[in-house]
Amino acid sequence: MDDFKNLYIQKNEFISTIYLNRPDKANALNMELWQEISMAFDFLENNAETRVIVLLGKGKNFCGGIDLMAFPELLGSVHHDDPARKSLNLEKKIKELQTWLGKPATITKPVIAGIQGACVGAGLDLVCGCDLRVVTKEAYFQIKEIDYAMVADVGTLQRLPDLLGDAKVRELAFTGDKWGAEEALGAGFVNMIVPDLEDGVNQLAQKMAQKSPLALQEIKKMIGFSRHHSQQESLDYIAQRNAFLLLSTDLQEAMMAGLEKRAPKFQNT
């Protein structure tokens, strides 16, 4: 946990916060930070004490997207004399980057993104995979890739239509226009606008961290499953999952705490 060069982790009881830490570069993602994000989420996924993960960026901006200086490194890593093999290598690398930046969506623990200033390009890819998004009034979002004659390929075009709506995503992807905090809140993409980002995020995380960690993880699984399955398939799935969850000691503890008018104390997972 202490070996990261471009981010750091801060733990506070059941909440762990990942700080992107390249403020002089607007926390733009070089290849090293890209991989460190994946490693940090893997570490916290396997950390029993962590129930909720918070993702923040140091400085004035959450994330300015991919560091343009990373492109030579990226293309150099897939070099081959044969164009076809170079293309295959590049496809494999893109899929690897998708896996790394998609960790907030694929791990079982809930992730809250706290966003200030710019959240563009790969930064938007990253927060699209988070479960909740809290922003300051200065925050703005942008599908920036079109301005570089590129197509967003690490999650935005796959996840954002479910969060924002197909027509609006097409407009933003085709134009590269910025959209601000108020618009994002009105569209349901962000959960709240707060005057103090860390305080607002931590208040939300504290509420969640007091809940059963088993239930938190199962809710995340269920919502993700329902997005891509029929209503009946989702009902069948939750019946299967609750067949073990309803037998958990967490349920017993929650009920006893309610009767005794005290805060419940749940085991870590």
Image: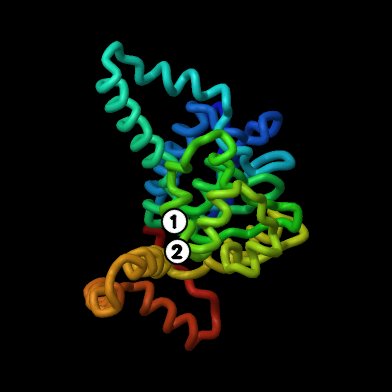
- Residue at image position (37%, 58%) is 269
The crowding category of the residue bearing disc 2, from other C-alpha atoms within 10 Å (few below 14, some 14 to 19, many at least 20), is: few
- Residue at image position (50%, 85%) is 260
Is 17 on the left or on the right of 49, as rendered? Answer: right
- Residue at image position (75%, 58%) is 137
Nearest the eye: 142 or 107: 142
Residue 188 in the image: state x and y as whole percent. Answer: 58, 68
Image label count: 2
Q: Quadrant of residue 224?
A: bottom left
On screen, residue 177 above or below 204: above
Residue 7 shows in the view: no
Disc 1 to disc 2: CB gap under 8 Å: yes
Specify the label residue 162 is tagged with.
2
Residue 263 in the image: state x and y as whole percent. Answer: 54, 75
On screen, residue 256 above or below 131: below
Residue 211 in the image: state x and y as whole percent. Answer: 48, 70
Nearest the eye: 176 or 104: 176
> What secondary structure is marked by label 1?
helix
Q: Amino acid at mark 2?
A: Asp
Nearest the eye: 168 or 186: 168
Q: Which residue is mark 1?
A: 159
The crowding category of the residue bearing disc 1, from other C-alpha atoms within 10 Å (few below 14, some 14 to 19, many at least 20), is: some
> What secondary structure is marked by label 2?
helix
Q: Quadrant of residue 249?
A: bottom left
Is 153 on the left or on the right of 113, as rendered? Answer: left
